[in-house]
Image (cartoon, rainbow, N blue to C red):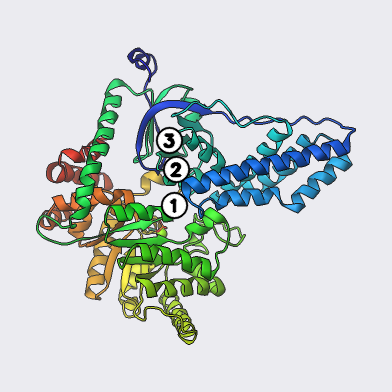
């Protein structure tokens, strides 16, 4: 760690990015400056020798990747390690190998130059796509290219990486991330990447904090700088001032100390001070998170984001593969509710079909895609319905806009059930079907869909973007993405009221459910079922246990008189400070002071 005098020389800088994996770490930065190999264009005479050299580098790259695959299986499990299998498959691609070998023969140029030129064509093509997922895949191919060229030069991957550092890089490939974890990396900080980037996904699995999409972290941070990675709020603090450092040291202590308390909390019910029982469920983005859901003793899983399988493995899973995956989740939850959402592909998530859309958020997304691709949809429906024989499964439909979409899906579900019955395959005849409330149009239609379904799940992440016409991924308008916009609050109130009039259960599974600032407001508006990311479960439970519905309703009455997001935020902050905070909640108190 730096001496005190070092902190005075360098000024504290705070960088804001995307909170990709929870946790707080303080440590020295290691700047991972990826060597970009400039392959020189040279003529050669020994063609056969060059081809042999190229094949040797392919074999070497493959054996490196196989070692990484083994390490990944060990660290993050077999399912998630398939991204490395996919990389090995690219190295085996006969089209790529033949075109490179043919060019070496015809052009008589160094293999490194041909590899560089040929593979860059692919990366350029893919990275020109607006699709963030495809851009990520371009990084994978770039990684493979650099690996082959490095092996052509017979050089090794950085061999002298110090232990226990926070890794700072422009971007990290999955293999970098896994290899750094072998050197006891403490966290990851990158210029590029979003929540769906592999760095983010792997960091979450490795249980290390990560902040991505910081733009200029590699410029602002120097080698050996002391940095703080705050994976809760997507912040990186470079050369922290002494008071910042002690604030974060305090936070780490609080995080550690309340972990013990969280164990006790896990055994307690979620109940307000005035005796209202609240349901607290976990959202499952990656299968590994189930451990945390169980450790916190959540009431069940309120959202399984099944589309994650495309992000991780780029394959279309068969009915059998899906069934096994869902069965595993359902069995682990031992009879507790598991809400499985059908593939919400499209939008900012990957589509299994290669098409370009000008406005993907307003395009072929979720149920719209599935109803036009019924074979995929049926495979998934059958897998979910089959899993229902082994626990309490519920089926959830994303991006619903019309009553016909619901009707058409229910007909399909009934067809699948009939088929299964004729095949003597068991399932739960009373499997409940619910609709995500994400599009304003369906809010208005709740009374009309009420007869067809049994529950609603509010996806505030999308509902806010569609209600306020603010792209949830666009940084330019991020100030306008307001969780506490009066229209959002009134719309939520309307949904709770209408759902109750129509006997529909409502859960809220968007990020708002895990935001402590929003908890008293949501309780006051009438929400009684929260589904949050697993690491937020104890925080939300503790807060719920500390407030009364009566106080929350008074708070809502005050809020209804206000006009702006800022005024509402201020009153919510104030409520947290005066009503709900105990010593341990200082983590949030300081964050809300920001
Ligand atoms: C939401 O929109 O709030 C939601 C939970 O769905 P997703 O974030 O997966 O779009
Ligand atoms: Mg959504």
Quarter of the picture containing the C terminus is top left
- Which residue position is annotated with label 3? 187
For the residue carrying disc 1, how many other residues have a C-alpha within 10 Å: few (<14), some (14-19), or many (20+)?
some
For marks 2 and 1, give the one nearer the viewer: 2
Q: Which residue appears at 37% of the width and 78% of the height?
A: 428
Location of residue 147 by image quarter: top right
Quarter of the view holding residue 106: top right
Front label number (1 vs 3): 3
**Are the two marked residues, 1 and 3, in contact with CB atoms closer than 8 angstroms?**
no
Asked if marks 3 and 2 touch (Cβ < 8 Å), the reply is yes
Q: Is residue 29 above or below residue 290?
A: above
- Circle 1 sits in a helix, a strand or a loop, which is it? loop
**Mark 2 highlights which residue?**
203
Among all residues in the image, which is located at the extreme right?
45
Q: If the picture is divided into quarters, which one holds ligand 1?
A: bottom left
- Spatial CA distance of label 2 from label 1 is 26 Å
Instruction: Give the residue at mark 1.
Output: 471
Check the picture and name the quadrant holding the N terminus.
top left
Q: Earlier in the sequence, mark 1 or mark 3?
A: 3
Bin the neighbour count of mark 2 within 10 Å (Cα to Cα): few under 14, some 14-19, many 20 and up.
Answer: many
Q: Describe residue 205's horizontal placement relative to residue 312 as left or right.
A: left
For the residues labelled 1 and 3, the Cα–Cα distance comes to 29 Å
């Amino acid at each position: 760690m730096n001496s005190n005098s070092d902190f005075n020389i360098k000024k504290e800088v705070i960088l804001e990015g995307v909170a990709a994996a929870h946790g707080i770490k303080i440590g020295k930065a290691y700047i991972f400056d990826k060597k970009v190999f400039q392959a020189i264009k040279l003529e050669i005479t020994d063609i056969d020798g060059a081809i042999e050299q190229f094949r040797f580098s392919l074999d070497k790259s493959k054996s490196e990747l196989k070692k990484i695959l083994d390490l990944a299986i060990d660290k993050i499990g077999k399912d998630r390690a398939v991204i490395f299998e996919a990389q090995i498959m690219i190295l085996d691609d006969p089209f790529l190998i033949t075109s490179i070998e043919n060019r070496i023969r015809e052009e008589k140029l160094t293999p490194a130059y041909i590899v560089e030129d040929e593979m860059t064509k692919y990366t350029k093509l893919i990275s020109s796509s607006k699709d963030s997922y495809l851009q990520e895949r371009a990084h994978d191919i770039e990684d493979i290219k650099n690996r082959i060229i490095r092996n052509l030069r017979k050089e090794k991957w950085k061999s002298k990486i110090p232990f226990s550092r926070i890794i700072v890089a422009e971007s990290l490939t999955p293999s970098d991330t896994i290899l750094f974890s072998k050197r006891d990396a403490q966290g990851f900080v990158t210029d590029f990447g979003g929540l769906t980037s592999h760095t983010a996904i792997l960091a979450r699995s490795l249980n290390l904090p990560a902040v991505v999409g910081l733009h200029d972290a590699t410029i602002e941070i120097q080698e050996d700088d002391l940095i703080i990675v705050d994976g809760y709020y997507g912040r990186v603090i470079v050369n922290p001032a002494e008071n910042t450092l002690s604030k974060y040291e305090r936070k780490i202590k609080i995080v550690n100390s309340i972990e013990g308390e969280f164990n006790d909390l896990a055994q307690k019910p979620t109940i307000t001070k005035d005796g209202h029982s609240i349901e607290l469920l976990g959202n499952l983005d990656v299968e590994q998170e189930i451990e945390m859901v169980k450790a916190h003793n959540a009431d069940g899983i309120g959202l399984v984001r099944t589309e994650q399988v495309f992000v991780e493995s780029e394959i279309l899973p068969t009915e059998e593969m899906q069934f096994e995956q869902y069965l595993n989740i359902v069995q682990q939850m031992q009879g507790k509710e598991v809400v499985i959402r059908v593939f919400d592909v499209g939008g900012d998530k990957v589509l299994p079909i290669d098409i370009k859309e000008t406005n993907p958020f307003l395009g072929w997304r979720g149920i719209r895609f599935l109803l036009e691709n019924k074979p995929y949809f049926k495979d998934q429906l059958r897998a979910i319905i089959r899993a229902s024989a082994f626990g309490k499964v519920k089926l959830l439909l994303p991006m619903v806009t019309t009553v016909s979409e619901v009707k058409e899906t229910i007909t399909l579900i009934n067809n699948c059930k009939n088929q299964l019955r004729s095949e003597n395959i068991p399932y739960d005849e009373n499997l409940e079907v619910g609709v995500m409330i994400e599009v304003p149009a369906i809010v208005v239609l709740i009374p009309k869909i009420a007869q067809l379904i049994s529950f609603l799940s509010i996806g505030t992440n999308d509902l806010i973007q569609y209600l306020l016409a603010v792209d949830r991924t666009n940084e330019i308008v991020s100030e306008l993405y307001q969780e506490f916009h009066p229209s959002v609050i009134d719309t939520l109130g309307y949904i709770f009221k209408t759902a109750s009039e129509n006997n529909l259960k409502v859960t809220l599974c968007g990020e708002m459910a895990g935001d402590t600032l929003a908890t008293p407001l949501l309780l006051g508006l009438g929400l009684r079922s929260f589904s949050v990311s697993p690491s937020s479960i104890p925080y939300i439970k503790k807060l719920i246990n500390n407030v009364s519905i009566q106080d929350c309703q008074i708070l809502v009455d005050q809020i209804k008189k206000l006009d702006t997001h800022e005024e509402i935020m201020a009153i919510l902050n104030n409520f947290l400070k005066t009503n709900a905070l105990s010593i341990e909640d200082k983590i949030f108190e300081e964050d809300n002071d920001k």
